[in-house]
């Protein structure tokens, strides 16, 4: 099946630094990718929808200047957590939508990136 | 707004036991319903799905039936294995191309 990778899988950084997380679709093109955030024992919460070649659409309550999303190619979307603070520590997961005929599209998830801000 | 509620875990079972993980949803219209599974250290994988009322999704011995009248999509398996130990997420999606709305996940632990 289709594979989505995320890099890095783990990152520890100091408060105030910026962290970039990459999401790649390895064997298919994805015009749409989604970024989720998961807190311990909580559900995945959608942060933003990333469309190739256009600005991301952010969910209510998600700061677009804090979480910068770039979807520059059909196989790569990046999430940059700017000026990270301890409350940004979380598990970030991306998914990529494989384009197929109507009704057959499938979303594939990356393995997630765990961010710890000290 | 739309939401998904699934039973609290963890669920602890012995091998070959019967499994039920309850999932109910709140949504307008006719969403598609999904079960995803997350094995330790791995990303979410689609387990099964149903796109309309009374559809039954099935995969790897797991089944779930889309019940419009009870707004439910309970996951069942007749005989669980140790390898089924994972976190299971129920989710819905309103239309193709949009993001999924997830429940909180239920951890299943199966012992031999």
Image (cartoon, coloured by chain):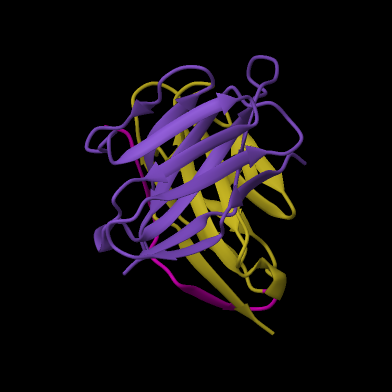
Which quadrant holds the N terminus of chain B?
A: top left
Given residues B96 and A14, the one toward you in this image is A14
**Is A65 drawn above or below residue B31 in the view shown?**
below
Q: Which chain is purple?
A: A
Given residues A9 and B67, the one toward you in this image is A9
Q: Could you say where residue A101 lies in the image, as x and y percent from the top left?
A: 70, 15
**Span highlighted in magenta in the image:** B1-16
Q: Which chain is yellow?
A: B
Residue B10 magenta-drawn?
A: yes
Residue A111 magenta-drawn?
A: no
Q: Quadrant of residue A46?
A: top left
Count up the numbered dots.
0
Question: In this rendering, would B94 be left or right of A5?
Answer: left
Q: Could you say where residue A48 lies in the image, as x and y percent from the top left?
A: 39, 33
Residue at 37%, 51% (x, y): give it.
A18
Of all residues, the one furthest to the left in this rendering is A61
Residue at 53%, 31% (x, y): give it.
A33
Using the rendered image of the protein, determine whether residue B102 is visible from the camera's viewpoint. Answer: no
**Is B99 drawn above or below residue A36 in the view shown?**
above
Given residues B57 and A92, the one toward you in this image is A92
Q: Quadrant of residue B54?
A: top right
């Amino acid at each position: 099946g289709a594979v989505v990778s995320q890099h890095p899988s783990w990152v520890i950084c100091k408060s105030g630094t910026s962290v970039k997380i990459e999401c790649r679709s390895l064997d298919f093109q994805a015009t749409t990718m989604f970024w989720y955030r998961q807190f311990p024992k909580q559900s995945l919460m959608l942060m933003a929808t990333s469309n190739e070649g256009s600005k991301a659409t952010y969910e209510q309550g998600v700061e677009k200047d804090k979480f910068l999303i770039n979807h520059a190619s059909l196989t790569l979307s990046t999430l940059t957590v700017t000026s990270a603070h301890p409350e940004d520590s979380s598990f970030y997961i991306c998914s990529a939508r494989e384009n197929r005929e109507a009704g057959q599209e499938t979303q594939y998830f990356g393995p997630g990136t765990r961010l710890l801000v000290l | 707004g739309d939401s998904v509620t699934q039973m609290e875990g963890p669920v602890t079972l012995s091998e070959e036991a019967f499994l039920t993980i309850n999932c109910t949803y709140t949504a307008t219209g006719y969403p598609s319903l999904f079960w995803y599974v997350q094995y330790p250290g791995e990303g979410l994988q689609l387990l099964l799905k149903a796109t309309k009322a009374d559809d039954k999704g099935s995969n790897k011995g797991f089944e779930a039936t889309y019940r419009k009248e009870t707004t439910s999509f309970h996951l069942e398996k007749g005989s669980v294995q140790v390898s089924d130990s994972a976190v299971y997420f129920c989710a819905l999606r309103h239309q193709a191309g949009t993001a999924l709305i997830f429940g909180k996940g239920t951890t299943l632990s199966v012992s031999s």
